[in-house]
Amino acid sequence: MTPEELARKADTAGLRLVRFLWCGNDGTIRAKASSRHGLEGRLARGIGVTRAMQAMNALDQLQPVEGYGPVGEFRLVPDLDTFRPLPYAPNTGVVLTDHVLPDGTPAGVCQRTFLKRQQERLRERGLDLRAAFENEFSLARCDDGDYTPVDTSLCFSTIAMAKSREYVDALVAALESQRIPLEQYYAELGHGQQEVSTAHASAVQAADEQILVRETIRGVAAEQELVASLAPKPWADVAGNGAHVHFSLWEGEQNRFYAEGGLSELAEQFLAGVLEHLPGLCGLTAPSFQSYARIAPGMWAGAYACWGHDNREAPVRVPSPFLGVEEASTNAELKAVDATCNPYLALGGIIAAGLDGVERGLVLPDPVNVDPATLPDGERPRPLPATQAEALDALAADDVLIGALGDELARPYLAVRRSEWAAFSAEDEEFTLQHHFEKY
Ligand code: GLU
Ligand code: MG
């Protein structure tokens, strides 16, 4: 599609604004919008954004990172194939963007380009990572600045479904209109908690859709004067919100994770790599201060570095394949993921970790088929990071992940996330709850 063709589509849809979206190192989603006037030029050449945004944390505190200060500019250059009219914002459309240098070359800090690079490494082996996010989120009313869950009902409760029926119907319609196929919806364990899972897609498309799904969850809520939050811990005493990632490697239409009777050797090596790098990977997949309220025993998010068949306390779960469609349904699920992650970094990190396992021919340890917390000392797998600071230290010490990110991305990323640790550690729990609720 050319900029002119896209502009004609925007006219047909009656759009006045097109949002140019990106997800930053802080995992928040931000945008600049173009009006119809000059749209073709901005679609072709992008919109300028200060380099400083890559050093901005989730409290809008600019961090001192060399090269990411007040001087210098990136272009937010859209991928025109990502264009959609937005069903929850009047006369507004959206595109996802790459960060590009003024001379037209990709910026080293660009998270979306990082994921494309990792996919390219797979493509050299004839492979493609397909992934799907399962987003949990909390639906609330805002009363005098306090967020109250819309229900206090049970896990998978139909009473909760009845309570949120209008919101959910609008959400499903909004996803359909953006060509994002919904697989399942249900009311989850926590108060006001909902879950939507969308279809798997090639990694860059899956990450793009994760951004659009997050936007849609919140956008539809705003239309109904509700607030939706994907924060890992919406309230201190209720179940957390995960964004589990299902993934598998494909060669054309063949699922290379599958072998007669279970996982292929390729899948085992790839998962061995994911497990080996899991502490550092958590710094990309569960990267916020609050992420560690759910990476804890008993949260069904995984707290010990292990994998298991249908084991919901293992951070890597291999679900039983479906009868009759074993090949198509063979996949692994990483549970140590939440929606405060930048999805391009999360999926790129999974590929870099998995490929390391393949390149080194790593052997997958035996599955853990009990709750790992119940194993005696000495048999229990090593714990995952217990705090954001530990996860970021593990990431900083992981040469494979840092090497894949590259210095221009790793440096501002670690600075931004570490500054959040410093800021939230100095405040009370209420401050943490409020800011994560409102930012994600
Ligand atoms: N809410 C749990 C989490 O934070 C997941 C529950 C489940 O879907 O198994 O990851
Ligand atoms: Mg769930």
Image: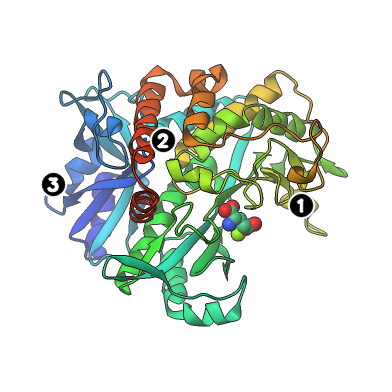
Quadrant of the rendered image holding ligand 1: bottom right
First reached walking from the N terminus: tag 1 or tag 3: 3
Horizontal and vertical percent for residue 288?
Answer: 44, 41
- What separation in Å lies between label 3 and label 2 (alpha carbons)? 25 Å
Q: Secondary structure at mark 1?
A: loop
> Does label 2 point to a residue whose CB lies under 8 Å from ligand 1?
no
Q: Looking at the image, which residue is at 52% across and 31% down?
A: 391
Quarter of image, res 41: top left
**The one of 427 and 328 positioned closer to us in this rendering:** 427
Q: Residue at x 62, y 72 (%)?
A: 156
Task: Find the distance from the CA under tag 1 to the CA under tag 3.
Answer: 53 Å
Q: Residues within 10 Å of mark 2 (few under 14, many from 20)?
A: many
- What SS does tag 3 mark? loop
Type of amino acid under label 2: Arg
Residue 74 visible in this rendered orientation of the protein: no
Q: Which residue is mark 1?
A: 310
Residue 294 visible somewhere in the drawing: yes
Estimate how packed mark 1 is, as few (under 14), some (14 to 19) or many (20 or more) residues with alpha carbons within 10 Å.
some
The vertical placement of 267 against 235, above or below, is: above
The numbered disc on residue 220 is none
Look at the picture and state if 251 lies above or below 35. above
Q: Which residue is mark 3?
A: 38
Residue type at mark 1: give it: Asp
The residue to which callout 2 is attached is 112
- Is 90 placed above or below 153 here? above
Residue 1 in the image: state x and y as whole percent: 34, 46
